[in-house]
Image (spheres, rainbow, N blue to C red):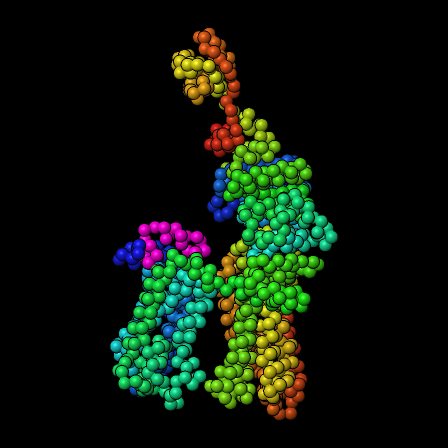
């Protein structure tokens, strides 16, 4: 097979080109800084605060820092490996440069090896950067340099698997998003496989112990094994140790690269065969008709067998009519078009919500009757809502700018009010399903007699205002930033800043997840509110004030952000005046 | 209809436009030509109210870009050099969306969309996805879009760029129809041969400076070299060349083709070129034709941007 010779076979030219490209990107250095920054920030709180502590206590602390540092690095690699590899081959396919590369004498294996080594180099470089921090732990005692090296080997092997998997998915899947999501799902499943197997009762172990196979299967458990060896129980007589996981992960990673090279010439054909486009398009059409209560059209579509008649399906014209054209675009084009996947995301979240009940029921049977769990769940659901509504809004304008459609709108008499109102209403409509999840959860557990009905009132008053505020601020960020990645990063920074606001500015009701946590009350009584109101106080009055303040801060914030948008709208959308 | 006075645009140290003054009258089709980075797009964007000039003034339909941008937006149709794509939008939806942005009423919208689709010959594609159209069709759709609100002025930035010959011809024919409809069009293009056929005026811009602005015939006349003529003899063109080159008032003589055409450049001292045919006839060459040097817009552009004229 061409290009399998060593040298060219290992893709030196591709490797050098990729490395140069990476070196020229600011994000490479930003990634290294963030990786180290997170590692240091996460470990600093664990560093022994007092020099007066005993040597043994300091050594224990050193061991703890090292252990948690290992877990953190496994998690960061899980996040980074798919992120840096997902575009490796997909990008070439999208730019139509893959065929050009395949026509050169390098051959498919050289291409994938070059891509693989350049990505692996980046990941390994991050691990090397963290070595000085880990070696500094030797001064605390509790661990030896051999432990550092063993952990390093586990992490490098895991990087090989992550990079190999990313390259393989990038070869066979059509888009970066698909490769990225599949990569995350597979790596997360690998890390969590022992926990799932134990939770579902496939592995019977004594409480607090794991089978040795867990360490051999999952790199995360292999790191656990390094520090808590006694918790692992050998179930077979064959002697095995920590090196099994690094061995199989690195071999599997390299095998996936080889497989990628073998299938690369067939990439386009495999991509088409694996495409779920027809199925998903049919699903979208059904959802679209359901949303518009078009029962007859829906029945007609179902009779036509949408999966089989996709190509021949007549195009349904979606009239703009008298509605706001921007709202029309967001709901008719962006929902089913550019952001078509959001409906599927919403559905997946609903399934995940219901599945989580089953998981909690299996793992912690009593927890579902405890209001604390529901506080966490409602806070998590509203947190996801806040995060996604801002991020979706943050991509909306910058994408139009990148697609070259914003300049077309800028040359029309479109005014700020129509634009922002259309966007806010449209995005809110698109995520209405997501917004409904906290209500669904609350309703289920109110009916089950676990949560107090007043919780529903609180959610009803606070969520719509908060969603509008988050969407408006997302639009503002998107108007300000030139590209989608920048807009997303700016939105995430803004949300992070807002998340800490309650602690520094005494604005708890501004933070939806935080207030949701406190105002989910047990069915037996309004504990938090009574605590705030005092023994003799009127808790309903407290609830009223809290709701008023919550809605008031969100409305006020929305108005402030809107006035900022209005003051610079023309400039933001590319008009001179 | 369009007027700029000492229009300048400076980006940091780069002077994109340098005191550009031009006038385009109602009904003019004005070809704006210049090399890449000359300032064409900058000028068009300023006129489309998408860019603020550093100094100077610009007027469209009597409205100043400084302060009357809203009025201008209703009077112009702007086609940028890149076609903005909405995924999953049909041709009809695309036009309906922009008609709504231009605040056209429902009944009017329907009629206008039908008209522009007919004009651009896209009626049969009304249900096609915009992102599935060929480049030529997309450009026709872009023209359909800017015609929705019946603008008086069309600002077209490289509308024929990247099109195949058939699509270019289609766009040219469409622009001719718009010219006949009385629209004032400012069009920037690299395809000079088509501008020659389409435009009645051109402006040549280089490094932000307007080197020439006026009727096409005027620039052709300016750049035409009056000291060069072409003659055609029936036989022995090489001997004829030798004869001419030996003459004191002939600076240069070249055989252009095997069918006897020669190009002759006369000396500045010569009063006119009448002595050339006389000389050839005197030496018994059978003279078939005499003509002035042929010049087209490309030659004019090359000469003007080289600083030969300006």
Q: Is residue A110 magenta?
A: yes
Question: Does A18 sit above or below residue A341?
Answer: above
Place of residue A486 in the rendered image (x, y in percent of width and height, measured from the top left): 49, 61
Q: Is B29 or A333 nearer to us in this picture?
A: A333
Please tell me which residue is depicted at 51% across the width and 83% down the height of the picture. Answer: A358
Please tell me which residue is depicted at 64% across the width and 87% down the height of the picture. Answer: A539
A192 sits left or right of B310 in the view: left
Magenta stretch prevailing secondary structure: helix
Question: Does A482 sit above or below residue B174?
Answer: below
Place of residue A119 in the rendered image (x, y in percent of width and height, measured from the top left): 36, 62
Place of residue A481 in the rendered image (x, y in percent of width and height, measured from the top left): 52, 59
Please tell me which residue is depicted at 39% across the width and 89% down the height of the picture. Answer: A207
B117 sits left or right of A147 in the view: right
Among all residues in the image, which is located at the extreme bottom? A535
Asked if residue A525 shows in the view, the reply is: yes
Q: Give, as a single range, the part of the protein colored magenta.
A: A90-111
Place of residue A63 in the rendered image (x, y in percent of width and height, measured from the top left): 32, 81
Q: Is A342 or A28 nearer to us in this picture?
A: A342
Q: Quadrant of residue A386?
A: bottom right
Q: Quadrant of residue A375?
A: bottom right
> How many marks overall?
0
Q: Quadrant of the N terminus of chain A?
A: bottom left
Q: Is residue A496 magenta?
A: no
Question: Does A355 sit above or below residue A311?
Answer: below
Please tell me which residue is depicted at 33% across the width and 85% down the height of the picture. Answer: A232
Asked if residue B46 shows in the view, the reply is: no
């Amino acid at each position: 097979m061409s290009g399998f010779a060593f040298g060219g076979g290992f893709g030196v030219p591709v490797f050098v080109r990729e490395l140069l490209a990476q070196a020229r990107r600011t994000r490479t250095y930003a990634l290294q800084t963030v990786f180290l920054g997170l590692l240091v920030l996460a470990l600093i709180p664990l560093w022994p605060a007092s020099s007066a502590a005993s040597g043994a206590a300091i050594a224990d602390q050193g061991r703890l820092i090292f252990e948690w540092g290992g877990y953190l690095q496994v998690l960061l690699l899980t996040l980074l490996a798919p992120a840096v590899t997902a575009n490796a081959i997909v990008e070439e396919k999208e730019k139509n440069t893959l065929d050009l590369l395949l026509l050169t004498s390098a051959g498919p294996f050289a291409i994938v090896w070059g891509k693989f080594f350049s990505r692996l180099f980046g990941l390994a470089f991050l691990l090397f950067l963290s070595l000085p921090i880990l070696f500094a732990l030797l001064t605390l005692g509790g661990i030896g340099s051999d432990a550092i090296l063993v952990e390093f080997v586990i992490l490098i092997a895991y990087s090989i698997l992550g990079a190999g998997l990313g390259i393989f998915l990038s070869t066979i899947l059509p888009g970066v998003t698909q490769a990225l999501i599949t990569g995350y799902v597979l790596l997360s499943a690998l890390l969590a496989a022992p926990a799932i197997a134990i939770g579902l009762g496939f592995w019977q172990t004594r409480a607090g112990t794991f089978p040795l196979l867990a360490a051999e299967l999952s790199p995360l458990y292999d790191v656990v094994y390094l520090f808590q060896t006694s918790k692992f129980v050998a179930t077979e007589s064959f002697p095995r140790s920590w090196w099994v996981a690094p061995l199989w992960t690195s071999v599997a990673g390299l095998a996936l690269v080889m497989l990628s090279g073998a299938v690369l010439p067939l990439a386009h054909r495999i991509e088409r065969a694996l495409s779920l486009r027809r199925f998903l398009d049919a699903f979208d059409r059904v959802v679209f008709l359901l949303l518009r209560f078009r029962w007859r059209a829906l029945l007609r579509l179902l009779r036509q067998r949408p999966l089989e008649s996709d190509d021949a399906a007549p195009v349904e014209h979606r009239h703009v009519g008298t509605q706001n054209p921007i709202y029309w675009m967001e709901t008719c084009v962006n929902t089913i078009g550019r952001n078509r996947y959001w409906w599927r995301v919403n559905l997946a979240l609903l399934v995940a919500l219901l599945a989580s009940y089953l998981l909690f029921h299996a793992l912690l049977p009593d927890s579902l009757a405890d209001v604390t769990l529901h506080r966490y769940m409602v806070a998590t659901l509203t947190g996801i809502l806040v995060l996604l509504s801002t991020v979706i809004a943050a991509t909306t304008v910058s994408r139009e700018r990148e697609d070259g459609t914003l300049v077309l709108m800028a040359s029309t008499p479109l005014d700020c009010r129509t634009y922002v109102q259309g966007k806010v209403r449209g995005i809110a409509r698109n995520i209405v399903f997501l917004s409904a999840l906290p209500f669904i959860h609350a309703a289920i557990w109110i009916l089950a007699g676990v949560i107090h009905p007043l919780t529903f009132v609180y959610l009803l008053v606070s969520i719509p205002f908060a969603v509008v505020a988050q969407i408006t601020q997302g639009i503002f960020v998107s108007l300000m930033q030139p590209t989608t990645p920048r807009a997303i990063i700016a939105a995430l920074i803004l949300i992070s800043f807002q998340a800490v606001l309650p602690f520094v500015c005494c604005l708890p009701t501004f933070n939806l997840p935080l207030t949701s946590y406190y105002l989910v009350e047990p069915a037996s009584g309004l504990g938090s509110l009574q605590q705030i109101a005092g023994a003799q106080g009127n808790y309903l009055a407290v609830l009223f004030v809290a709701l008023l303040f919550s809605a008031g801060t969100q409305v006020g914030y929305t108005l402030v952000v809107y006035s900022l948008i209005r003051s610079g709208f023309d400039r933001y959308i590319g008009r001179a005046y | 209809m369009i007027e700029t006075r000492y229009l300048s645009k400076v980006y940091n140290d780069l002077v994109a436009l340098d005191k550009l003054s031009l006038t385009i009258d109602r009904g003019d089709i004005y070809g704006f030509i210049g090399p890449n980075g000359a300032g064409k797009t900058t000028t068009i964007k300023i006129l489309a109210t998408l860019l603020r000039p550093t100094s100077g003034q610009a007027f469209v339909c009597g409205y100043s870009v400084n302060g009357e941008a809203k009025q201008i937006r209703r009077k112009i149709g702007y086609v940028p050099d890149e076609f903005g794509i909405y995924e999953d939008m049909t041709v009809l939806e695309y036009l309906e969306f922009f008609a709504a942005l231009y605040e056209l009423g429902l009944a009017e919208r329907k009629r206008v969309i039908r008209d522009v689709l007919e004009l651009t010959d896209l009626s049969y594609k009304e249900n096609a996805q915009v992102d599935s159209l060929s480049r030529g069709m997309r450009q026709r759709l872009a023209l359909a879009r800017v015609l929705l609100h019946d603008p008086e002025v069309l600002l077209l930035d490289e509308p024929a760029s990247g099109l195949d010959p058939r699509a270019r011809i289609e766009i040219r024919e469409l622009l001719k129809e718009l010219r006949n409809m009385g629209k004032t069009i400012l069009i920037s293009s690299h395809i000079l041969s088509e501008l020659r056929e389409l435009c009645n005026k051109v402006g040549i811009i280089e490094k932000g400076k307007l080197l020439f602005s006026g009727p096409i015939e005027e620039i052709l006349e300016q750049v035409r070299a009056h000291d060069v003529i072409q003659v055609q003899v029936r036989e022995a063109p090489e001997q004829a060349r030798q004869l001419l080159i030996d003459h004191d008032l002939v600076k240069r003589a070249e055989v252009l083709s095997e069918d006897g055409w020669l190009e002759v450049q006369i000396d500045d001292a010569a009063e006119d070129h009448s002595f050339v045919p006389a000389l050839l006839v005197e030496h018994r060459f059978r003279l078939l034709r005499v003509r002035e040097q042929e010049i087209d817009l490309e030659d004019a552009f090359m000469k003007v941007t080289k600083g030969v004229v300006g």
